[in-house]
Structure formats: C-alpha cells, structure tokens
C-alpha cells in the first residue's frame, strides 16, 4: 500500500544519505535502496527496489541518475540496478525526482508516461550549490598550492554562478583576483566588483597566474594555451565532463591540472543534501 507521505531514495552518494536522513527528520517516512554499506539513523528504512517502489509515492533518484547510461548510480552498493523497461514500470503513477535525467529517458520509452522532475535544472539549486563548489575549490587550492592564497594571483574563468561566488571568496582571502568573461555586460560587473576584468579569448597572453579556476564547460585550456604558461600554475577545473582543460597536455608541460567534479557531495554532503531536499520541496509545492 502506498503512503502518500513517503519518500523512496534510490542510490547516490553522501548527498543522498544526508537527504534521506533530513527528510526523515521532517517527519516523513523514508525508504532507502542502494545503500548496502551505509548505516542510517533508525528513522530511515532500508528496503529492496520493489518494496521501495511499492510503498512510496515520491521517488528521489541521485545526481547524476546514471554514470554509464545503463545502471542507476549506486555508490554504496555492490548490487547493480539496471535502468530498463522493468525499472521504469515500477515508477509509474509516482512523482520521480532526479538530477541530470537526460540519459535516464533513453533507457525506456515508458518514461514518456511518467511524471518526472529534474532538480538539477532548477535555478535555486544551481545558485545554492555554487557555494559548496566554491568552498571545495578553495580547499583544493589550499592543499595543492605551495604558497598562501593570500597574496596569490588567481584567475577565475567564467562569471556565472560559481564564478561570482568564488571570486568574492578569493578576494576576501586576500588574493589578487582576475576574472574573465565573454560578454561586455559581465566585464562591466567584474570591474564594478573590484576585480581585474579580462576577455576569455585573451587570457594568459602575457599575464601569468599562480592558480587558475575554470568554470566554463568548453575547451579553454588547449595545448596551445597551456604551452604559454611559463609559471606552471595550479589549474582547478570545475566544469562538467569532459572539462575545459587538455589534461594530457598539461601533464606533459608539468602543470598540475585537477578536474574537480561533484565537489558539494565530497566537501559538504550535508549541505548539498539539504539543497536537494529544499529544491524538491519547492517543486512539490508548485
């Protein structure tokens, strides 16, 4: 029998663990599947896939829903859950929430008849998620850069959500911050915030930096551009796969380039879980 006040959390990483416990703390019934190696609080009930689907009206899938396009993203389970027609049929007559749902829809035509919502596309999710991403990037910089961020020359490529927050944090630490953008309107905002502004197509022509943070999901740091970097900066790429850096070329040039993916789940899983939860609550209210 379906409980209309129940949530089924299927798969994921530390964010979904925190999410399940937070929803349970709000007084809802929560079933979790795909977390064999996790010990939840007593308020979260572990269950198999069929039981979770049978009892829950609201299903929450991980971010990303799938890594390989074939199986559900289940970090804490050795048992795989295949995404196919059978899985999709279990989700019928439910509200299904997930992050980066595109590849899921390709696994079955049944998804055309299922009520789904992608929390990854929501603006409030993206804005709030930028904070732990920026903090995680700074944590990596502090660990990998041999000097101090205070007084270092930092370049932030892209003035989107992450770029805005990261630039402000770096300036607060005392770094000399240059921010690049493509739009003239963004350049004006960058200058008004007290940063040095640079067009993205002109970065690293003459200037050398200690640390570079890339937020643009395009091949910005090509072999040609990397070859101009005499100072061998630390590069932290925050963009989604495949990233904006030629990592093979960076290695050959002796440049430490790190592709820092899914930082919220790694550095602040509790906060990241709360962000997902609140975004889903907003979607349900609407």
Image (cartoon, rainbow, N blue to C red):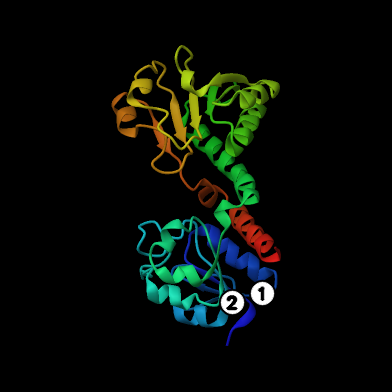
Residue 157 position (above or below residue 82): above
The reply, left or right, for residue 70 in relation to residue 176 is left
Which residue matches tag 2?
A: 57
The reply, left or right, for residue 79 in relation to residue 184 is left
Residue 206 position (above or below residue 118): above
Residue 114 appears at what percent x and percent y? 51, 71
Residue 79 position (above or below residue 134): below
Which residue matches tag 1?
A: 28
Taking the spot 46% from the left edge, 41% from the top edge, the residue there is 260
Lower sequence index among marks 2 and 1: 1
Residue 223 appears at what percent x and percent y? 33, 25
Residue 261 position (above or below residue 15): above
Question: How far apart are the two marked residues, 2 and 1, measured between alpha carbons?
Answer: 12 Å
Which one is nearer the viewer's eye here, 129 or 149? 129
Residue 239 appears at what percent x and percent y? 47, 39
Residue 82 appears at what percent x and percent y? 36, 69
- Is any part of residue 75 visible from this angle? no
Which quarter of the picture shows residue 162? top right
Taking the spot 51% from the left edge, 65% from the top edge, the residue there is 61
Image quarter (top left, top right, bottom left or bottom right) of the N terminus: bottom right
Q: Of discs 2 and 1, which sits in the foreground?
A: 2
| SS for callout 1 | loop
Which one is nearer the viewer's eye here, 64 or 250? 64
Dot 1 alpha-carbon crowd within 10 angstroms: few under 14, some 14 to 19, many 20 or more: some
Are circles 2 and 1 on residues that touch, CB within 8 Å?
Answer: no
| SS for callout 2 | strand
Q: Residue 173, labelled with which disc?
A: none
């Amino acid at each position: 029998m379906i409980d209309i006040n129940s949530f089924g959390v299927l798969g994921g990483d530390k964010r979904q663990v925190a999410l399940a416990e937070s929803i349970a703390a709000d007084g809802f019934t929560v079933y979790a599947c795909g977390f064999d190696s996790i010990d939840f609080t007593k308020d979260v009930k572990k269950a198999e896939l069929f039981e979770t689907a049978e009892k829950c009206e609201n299903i929450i899938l991980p971010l990303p829903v799938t890594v390989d396009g074939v199986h559900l993203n289940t970090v804490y389970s050795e048992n795989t859950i295949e995404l196919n027609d059978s899985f999709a049929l279990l989700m019928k007559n439910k509200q299904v929430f997930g992050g980066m749902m595109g590849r899921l829809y390709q696994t079955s035509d049944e998804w055309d008849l299922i009520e789904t919502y992608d929390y990854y596309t929501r603006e409030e999710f993206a804005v709030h998620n930028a904070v732990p991403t920026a903090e995680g990037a700074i944590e990596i910089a502090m660990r990998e850069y041999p000097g101090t961020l205070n007084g270092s020359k930092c370049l932030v490529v892209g003035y989107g959500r992450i770029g805005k927050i990261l630039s402000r944090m770096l300036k607060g630490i005392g770094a000399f911050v240059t921010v690049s953008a493509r739009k003239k309107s963004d350049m004006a905002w960058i200058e008004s915030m007290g940063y040095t502004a640079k067009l993205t197509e002109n970065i690293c022509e003459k200037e050398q930096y200690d640390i570079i943070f890339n937020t643009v999901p395009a091949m910005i740091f090509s072999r040609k551009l990397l070859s101009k970097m005499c100072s061998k900066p630390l590069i932290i790429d925050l963009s989604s796969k495949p990233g904006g850096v030629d990592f093979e070329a960076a290695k050959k040039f002796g440049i430490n380039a790190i592709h820092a993916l899914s930082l919220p789940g790694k550095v602040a899983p509790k906060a990241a879980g709360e962000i997902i939860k609140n975004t889903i609550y907003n979607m349900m209210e609407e």
